[in-house]
Image (cartoon, rainbow, N blue to C red):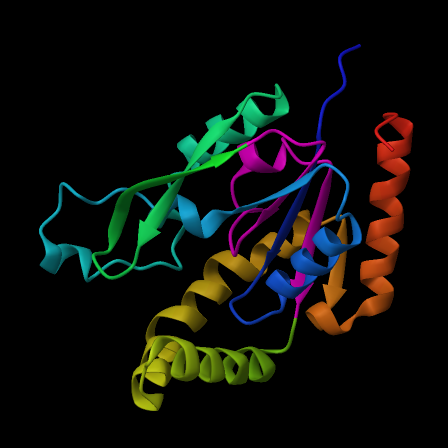
Amino acid sequence: MMRKPVVIGVAGGSGSGKTSVTKAIYESFKGHSITMIQQDFYYKDQSDLPFEERLKTNYDHPLAFDNDLLIKHIEKLLRYEPIEKPVYDYSIHTRSKEVIAVEPKDVIILEGILVLEDERLRNLMDIKLYVDTDADIRIIRRLSRDIKERGRTLDSVIEQYTNVVRPMHNQFIEPTKRYADVIIPEGGQNHVAIDLMVTKIQTILEQKSFL
């Protein structure tokens, strides 16, 4: 039987710490054959829309993502074929003309707020993780990040969180928790859960004779 890469899905709300969990797992396998695919890179191309329309994009809604392309790319990586990952340019609210070449690896970590929402994506995963963090912690992290890193004002972040992020989280992201094999409370701070995940991935890799 032909060997197949291990696919790990990491979901969770904005500010939950899913990126920290992903990075911790990635770092644990540094030196091994591992790659990260972020769902954020797969927002739909909107170059056919006027800029004013693009400004209305709800980035927390499932329809914002080009899951068809993401699934096609994961399937190629599962066949050990390289892909050209798209790059999304938030300044123009559509895809950049650039792409990133990604070589196939033995471990693929797929990370994003809604990676567990699409059944087709879930069916490609060996392990499904949901990073579960209290809403007050998530909003504080988002405030800190958006103000420091993205030059946003306090009022604009709060308004977006109240009108878009929170309702989308409750409607679409939180319900995907039921699909997770493992729920990790408190994200990257939960070293015990991360260590358990790393051990589990190592076991799968050993069974597939990758390590």
Observer-nearest residue: 11 or 104?
A: 104
Residue 39 relative to residue 51: left or right? right
**Residue at coordinates 74% horizontally, 59% vertically from top-left?**
183
Residue 115 image offset from top left, x and y in percent: 55, 47
Residue 44 image offset from top left, x and y in percent: 31, 43
Q: Quadrant of the C terminus?
A: top right
The answer to which image quadrant residue 123 occupies is top right
Return the residue found at the far top: 1
Q: Quadrant of the N terminus?
A: top right
Residue 12 image offset from top left, x and y in percent: 59, 61
Q: Is residue 117 magenta?
A: yes
Q: Is residue 111 magenta?
A: yes
On screen, 185 above or below 29? below
The answer to which image quadrant residue 104 occupies is top right
**Residue at coordinates 87% horizontally, 42% vertically from top-left?**
202
Residue 55 relative to residue 22: left or right? left
**Residue at coordinates 65% horizontally, 65% vertically from top-left?**
20
Return the residue found at the far front: 31
Residue 154 relative to residue 202: left or right? left
**Residue at coordinates 9% horizontally, 51% vertically from top-left?**
50
On screen, 51 above or below 1? below
Q: Which residues are magenta?
A: 103-132
Residue 59 image offset from top left, x and y in percent: 35, 58
